[in-house]
Image: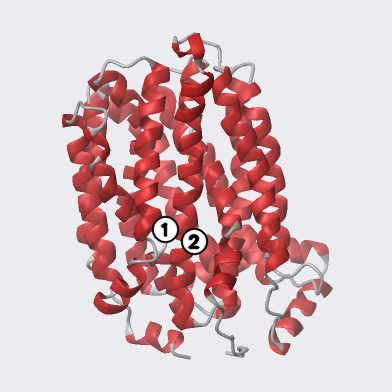
Amino acid sequence: MNMLKKPNLSFWQIFNMNVGFLGIQFSFGLQQTAINPVFLFLGAPEDMLPILNIAGPVTGLVVQPIIGAISDKTWSPRWGRRKPFFLIGAIIGSLCLFAFPLSPALWFAVGLLWILDVGNNMAMEPYRAFVGDKLPEKQLSLGYQMQSLFVGAGIVLANASIFLFQDWFGGDSVTDVVGTIPKWLYYSFFIGSLLSVATILWSVLKTPEIPPSDKELSEINMHKALPFLERFKMPFIEISKAVKEMPSFMWKLSVVYLFQWYALFVYWQFITPLFRTTMGYDLSEAAAQAAKMSTTYNIATIVVALMLVPLTLKYGGKKIYAASLLGTGLALLSIPYITDPIYVLIPMILFGIGWAAMMGIPYTMVSKIVPQERRGVYMGILNMMIVIPMGIETLTFGPIFKNLLGGNSINAMLFAGVFFIISAILALRLNVSKEENKVSNF
């Protein structure tokens, strides 16, 4: 493998590199907490929430691996390799966030979600590869846990804005009116629209990309010289080849992700309905309480994200990751039985530790075992492992919720908790083979 030696970066260089994740995750924070309430405000029934969220899995499955493969074969002395893609994605996401609260009908909001997800996925995948491109192996853990910190920070700001703006500007709008999105919800989307572009620009301007090696540049130029049809087919060929040659570690991780991300999608979709069931809240109050839950666990993520770096070095990523998944499962199992709006925030500390691990540790482990010149496509495939369980959930959980769980959001939350515990057990199987170690030590 022809690789350039990567210099160590300072803490603030790694910080600046990851600032763009703040805007991306503000957008994802709104998707987690505000999009489903918007659908409900526009008249969607609860059992339709899973299928209405299918945009995320489908666009992630299609966009991220393709963008990853294309960015692997891209280089511009002026714009770099990964940065053009996450800048374009941020602009698309920004426009959609601005328009979202102005949706006149449910179909319009669902359509915007599809476009928003395309933009977010276009920004997300190259960003994961960007960090791996820049950092030497010994700094990968810090780089990805710094991303985890900004994941928490972006979602905290998104969700805090929801309940703060409701408190400041809600007025009489806390009474639910089907077909109407309350005005206080507009402001969070407008702020997200601004942050999406501003934070990405910060990282783009502050962080130069490492030029490709002579061998990589030769391959890139050969790719550019191909006829258009051949270049069009190349990402699909690269993805297919990478899947066939995928390390066994990633196959094991895909099984963990099946249960982990299925459970996360259930949580995000049914935390707002849960508070309508357990606390008797109206929809506005339930949405605000869900935002407080998300704010709490993401504050915990910010606090512990960098603390996980020395812990993973001492005990190994596998053990810390499995323990965090177990803690998340226990948190979800306890939430339905806590009816106090303050005390119910306590389990979110465990959830936040788990979220910090989920957003950092798997990326660190995978980045160490995949070839440098194919990091983009493998990060895209890693995302496929996220969105496929989400897609399965959107297609299957509506009938499960309605027919097996009695249409009860309490049972939905317990279901998600059990799935997290299963994922924790499966995470204990995440061992790197001797052949994969050879790649990481090359």
Residue extending farthest front: 168
The answer to which quarter of the image holds residue 26 is: top right
SS for callout 1 = loop
Q: Are marks 2 and 1 in contact (CB under 8 Å)?
A: yes
- Disc assigned to residue 409: none
Seen at 58% across and 58% down, the residue is 19
- Total labels drawn: 2
Image coords of residue 185 (percent x, y):
55, 25
Left or right of residue 279: residue 179: right
Note whether 420 is above or below 149 in the view shown.
Answer: above
Note whether 257 is above or below 321 in the view shown.
Answer: above
Left or right of residue 166: residue 114: right
Q: Which residue is mark 1?
A: 359
Seen at 60% across and 78% down, the residue is 373
Image coords of residue 333 (percent x, y):
18, 39
Image coords of residue 10 (percent x, y):
55, 77
- Disc 1 marks a residue whose amino acid type is Met
Whether residue 146 can be seen here: yes
Left or right of residue 133: residue 222: right
Whether residue 375 can be seen here: no
Image coords of residue 277 (percent x, y):
26, 19
The answer to which quarter of the image holds residue 336 is: top left
The answer to which quarter of the image holds residue 269 is: top left
**C-alpha span from label 2 to label 1:** 8 Å
Left or right of residue 403: residue 222: right
Q: Which residue is mark 2?
A: 147
Snapshot colouring: secondary structure
